Each structure stands twice: as C-alpha cells, then as structure tokens.
Amino acid sequence: MPDITTLKSCCQPLAALEDSQLQKLVENMAVMEVEAGDYLLRSGEAIEHVYFVIEGRLASLFTRDWGEQRILSELSAGDLIGEVELINGEDCQLDVIALEATRVFQVPYEMFSSLLEHNEDFWVYVSERARAQTWKLLVSQFLNNLFGTSKSDISDPLIRLQADNDWLDFELEILQRIEKNIHWVTLNRGEVLFRQDEQPDGAYVLVSGTMNVSVLGENNEVRDVALLRQGEIVGELSLITHDKRSATVTAVRDCELFRIDADIFDRVSERYPRIMLGIHKTISKRLRANIPGKEALANSSNIALVSALPDIDLPDTADSLYESLNQYSNTILLSSTLTEQYLKRPNITHSHTGEPGNTRLVQWLNNQESRYDHILYQADSSWNTWTRRCIRQADHVIIVADPERPHLSEQLIEHLTISRQQWSLLFTHPSGTERPRNTRQWIADALPAEKISEDVSTRRKTDANPKFIHHLRTNHKPDYLRIARILAGYATGLVLGGGGARGFAHLGVLRALEELDVAIDMVGGTSIGAPISGWVAQQMKATESRNAATDAFHSLIDLTFPSTSVIAGKRIA
C-alpha cells in the first residue's frame, strides 16, 4: 500500500494538497506492475482509472492513416496517464505500452475527478498537461495535411523510401521545435487574427473553429475569398514571399490556433523542400479562390438551433432534424442535458470563462469537431449561458419560429444585426398545412428592414435578413430530409428554362425524376419554366403538373379558320 510521502514524491503537484485529501487518495488507489511489452491502455477502451507512474518507462502510441504506429511521447516517473481522457470526457485515444518493467499507482476515475473539482491549482496543472498532450496528438495528425502527402501517394519505391526517412526526421524535429516555443492564440467570434498589409509574425494552424479570409479591393470593397476549417494553415504565403499579409483573417466563431514561428518555417523550407508540397497545394487553392466575383463557399459544420419563442417545441424539431441529418453525414446532437450526460458533470454547460468546468467543456466540444462532420447544437428555451455558447460555437444559426407569431427576442435581434454569422429561419407548420403563407410579413414584423449595421473594422455591410428560409410540417419526414440535404451539401436543385415547346420536355423530366425517386430540394425557372417550377415547389406530382399544363394550354389556345393561322391569338394578346 503506498503512503503519502511516496505519493508526494511521485507527483510534485500533489504536495500542495492537504494530507487528509492525500490520505483519502491513498486509501482508494492500488499499485500495478506492467511488464515490458504489455499494454496498460488500448485505444478505444473506456477509461476507468487514472495512473501515476512510480518507476519505469512507457510510451503512448498513435496510429497513422496507413496503419503504422509511432511513439507520440515517452512517460516516466511522475507522469500522469489518462488525464487527457478525463478532461475531455472520452475513451482512450492512444495505446500505452511499457518499454520496460513499470510500476504505477491506479486511481479510480471518479475519485480523481472529485479531487480535481475541489482543488483549483491541481485542476490547472492537470488541464495544462491534458492540453499539451492533446496538442501533440493534433499536431501529429495535422502535419501530414499541412506539409506533404502520405507515402501511399508516391509510386516509385526508392523515392517513397527516401520520403519516409525525410518525413520521420522532419516530424521529430518540427514537433520538438514547436513544443519548446508553442504560442497558443484564442479568438472570440468577430476578433481579427491579422489584417491585410500587416507584417507577418508566423503561420497559424487552426485547431478548432472557423475563420474567414477576406481581401480589400481597389475600391475599398471587402470580398470574402475563403473559409478555414480545423487543421488548415493560414499566413504561410507571407512567410514564403517575405511580404506583408495579403488578406485579413477573422474568427467566424470562437477559435483556437497555434503559431509556427517564421524561423521554424524557414528551416522546414531549407532542409525539407519535398515536405513543402502540401503548403504549395494550399497556396494554389487559395490563389485560385482569390478571383474577382468568386465568393467563399460556406459549408456549415456546426449548426445551432435556437427558438424564437420560449414555448416553441425545440427538442422534437432537433431530434427529427438530427435523425435526418445523420443519414447524410456523421452527426452528433448536443443539448445542455445531453452534454452534461456525456461529461458526467451536472451544470457544466453553464460554467463561465475561467472556471475549471469551462476549460473541460471547451476542450470536449473542440474534440467533437474532429470526430463528426456536423454538430447540431440545441439551445435552451431561455437566453442563458448554454444558448450563448451554442451561437458562439455555430457556423450557421437556425432560428425555429412559429409562422403565426412574428417575434424575435431583443438578444437575438442584437446578435443578428452585428454578427457576420450566417443564419436562417425555420418555420414549423401543423402537419396538414398545404403551403406556407405570410413569410414576408413575418420577417417585416419581427425584424425591421432598417436593422443594418456596418462593421467598421472590415468596412462590410451586414444585412440582417436570413440567408435561407425553410418550411417544414411537423411529423412530415420528407421536409426534415430536405433541410438535412441542404445543410449537409447533398441537395438537388432543378432550374427549368424558357421556350414554349421546351415546357413539354420539362414535364417529361419531372416524370423521369419522380420515377427515379429523386427528391427536388430547390427549384427555379424562367418563362414557361417558371409556372412549372411553381408546381414543383407546391409538391405537385408529375401527373398533376401535366394536367395543370394541359388546362393552361387549352385556356390559351383558341382555334380559328386557318386563313392565316390555326390560332386566332386573341386570348394571348
């Protein structure tokens, strides 16, 4: 059985705890011996204990995309194992293997968690360690995307062998260099990372969040050219060209980044020119996007559902939309209740900045971004801490509204009129509703048109009107699937052109699409295509559209004696 003195010497931060707390810890822990080559933990396993290393050496291993394992870090006396999973509330991320005979203290998960909650200094120590380990794992995972290609992309075996050696040398060196001089940057929504024409201080890797890249044109007009997601690099062009910043980068939502200093970047360029291939590809894509008239595409990965009124049934809408969205992409639904259940911490969703619970919550939410294609945030019915967090975390805010009651809270109106965040309206109708009505009037009453503000820092006008307007009928699954396809990027759009004879061809196209079970999510048309697209929008069947076209044709065509024409033309005139 270990004693308090051994425990203090094993982990220095424990020395700050009271003896009564340490005694309770001692009474609940056990000593484990791990032989060389045996695994203490395996990736994907549920974490039930946290471990203090007493003596010996272990290694944490992660698996590359192509199946190869590498050592992420070595662990020796005084190190903690399992704290990352404890902080992030998830299963084991890495394999942990003994490099030699090793002894560890085994502490029950709940016991260790309770100790953290009641000791802020110890919490800070453990959370910083967890953050450092998470950072090393993220950097290792991102390096391949940032600086090169996987070995499977190289066909020549000799070149591939050299590339492997270069990659291992590079990976070890850059990890060590960045780790010694890490610069973390945290930005709130709307804050600027750097501005166009500023001097560069390094390149940045986006760990979590979404950022917008914009350029200022000759006429002082701001144009968005790119959106950055987790794992992407920004600011590298200025380091290569040794020139000023070519664009302004702004946080679309709360973001966390780390900086690669210019000297590290220069060393990579000089020593590992082959590794710079990935950077060159990134620059090429961004330069192609920087074309006048071309706008950045806003694919939303984080979506927040917020109710316009407290009594709107948001949970049912969120559940149905989640089920539909999950059919097209890997999605997780997060409400305050579900999040607290995942983390096994009541009220953690209402923690504030600076509190230990907030650190754990933010890290856990950031980790979900790397696991899922979409996160669907369900806000609370009131304007509270969780609702504000949902909006801050979201790329796209969807306000669920009652079409009969035009109302938006003052907090929502203020947010929408000063934010550059993309937002939409979703009207829920009774299941028997044939078609939506009074949408324009609802918007005019709930959100006056004069609600327009100007972002002085970017000289960009922000229109307060919604980007999209969705309508759905409760318990009508096709409506939820349509919205899910639009959000996931799998929507099918149909545009019908003009020309009288072509209108008959449109009817055949509608019939063919219907026979193939192709759902039309968006539709538009011109001339003869306009009324036919209107029938599609009303969800008329192909047969109904054909009958409507026949009636319309007969009402317009009036036959006469063909002295000049078989059609008199009076009705058309």
Image (cartoon, rainbow, N blue to C red):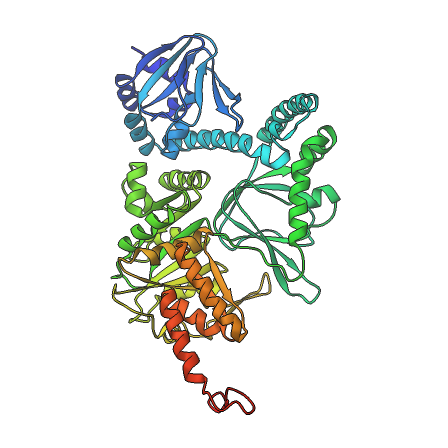
Q: Residue at x 42, y 41 (%)?
A: 372
Q: Nearer the viewer, residue 271 or 120?
A: 271
Image x and y of residue 303, in percent: 41, 52
- Image quadrant assignment for residue 3: top left
Q: Residue at x 40, y 76 (%)?
A: 550
Q: Residue at x 47, y 32 (%)?
A: 134
Q: Judge from the rendering whether residue 163 lies leftward or rightward of residue 392; answer left or right.
A: right
Image x and y of residue 326, in percent: 37, 46
Number of numbered markers: 0
Q: Nearer the viewer, residue 288 or 4?
A: 288
Is 521 above or below relative to 254?
Answer: below
Q: Residue at x 54, y 73 (%)?
A: 498
Asked if residue 223 shows in the view, the reply is yes
Q: Judge from the rendering whether residue 402 lies leftward or rightward of residue 369; answer left or right.
A: left
Asked if residue 122 shows in the view, the reply is no
Is 474 above or below relative to 181?
Answer: below
Q: Nearer the viewer, residue 210 or 133?
A: 210
Image x and y of residue 532, in percent: 44, 71
- Image quadrant assignment for residue 239: top right
Q: Nearer the viewer, residue 429 or 6?
A: 429
Image quadrant for the N terminus?
top left
Image x and y of residue 58, in percent: 46, 15
